[in-house]
Image (cartoon, rainbow, N blue to C red):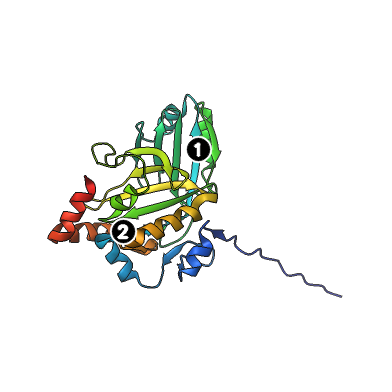
Amino acid sequence: MTTTSSATTSPAPVRRSALDAIHAALGARWISETIRWPESYGDVERERASLGAGVALAEPGPFDKLAVNGPRALDAVRAAGLQGEPGRLTPATPGQPNAWVIAPDQVLLAWPAWMPGAWTPLRPDGGSDLADQLRAAGAAVTDVSSGYTTLRLIGSRARDLLGELCPIDLHETVLPNLGIVQLAMANCRVTMARRDHAELPGFVVIVARDEAEHLWDVLSTLGAAHGLVPVGGAAITPPNLAAAAAAGATQPNLAAAAKKARR
């Protein structure tokens, strides 16, 4: 008697946002069946328009993240071939992470877990090789990919909205583009960087995963008066951000609002 066996294929793991339920209630169209981050909420044109006319609220991702700590944290980051300056966000270059240098002894490295379009891992090893390099250079390294949520606020009214929640001055002379601060926002402890796109004001907020729903709800509620629109990843691609910035620069009312928001 001949017996046959069939190989059992394990289903692909599903990576879920901490805001999965909120995105689903808003009608999210997911990046893929296994990457449950919103690509859009069904009206990409409206979402793109919000970049220049009010405030766009997005949760980009997923991101892999490494917390690098200790007296040699920044030295280790630089020894690994990465750039960084205390108190500044150094945006990613192709194949490299964003470097949030909160202080010389506290750095957060974050990079997209998947390459847009192909949706294949950007770092198939999950960052373990980089972590080993950093440890070898004397830093303490922890994978915090699932521990934090990243939010983006972009648009001419972004600073007005944050002004209702932040206890600090967001004037660009105090918090310049790519500057980092740690502060309390809606009773949540967050790390925030200014991330403008030409004349289009923007901010990136990193918050603990278990506080993300609360912060999203507060931003959405207060943001209604500022024209806040939730947007998916398709609306905030670099070409769309550049187009929104260019459109704002050619429309006097939007340009004036954006200039005011930067002050």
Q: Position of residue 203 (x, y in %)?
A: 33, 48
Q: Secondary structure at mark 2?
A: strand
* Most foreground residue, 173 or 236: 173
Residue found at x 51% / y 50%: 211
Residue ID for mark 1? 67
Residues packed near mark 1 inside 10 Å, few (<14), some (14 to 19) or many (20 plus): some
Residue found at x 39% / y 61%: 233
Q: Is tag 1's residue or tag 2's residue first in the polypeptide sequence?
A: 2
Residue 91 visible here: no
* Most foreground residue, 39 or 57: 57
Name the residue type under label 1. Ala
Q: Position of residue 129 (x, y in %)?
A: 52, 39
Residue found at x 55% / y 50%: 210
Q: Position of residue 44 (x, y in %)?
A: 34, 69
Q: Position of residue 66 (x, y in %)?
A: 50, 40
Which disc number belongs to residue 55? Answer: 2
Residue found at x 36% / y 31%: 86
Marks 1 and 2 in Cβ contact (< 8 Å): no
* Most foreground residue, 1 or 145: 145
Which residue lies most toward the right here?
1
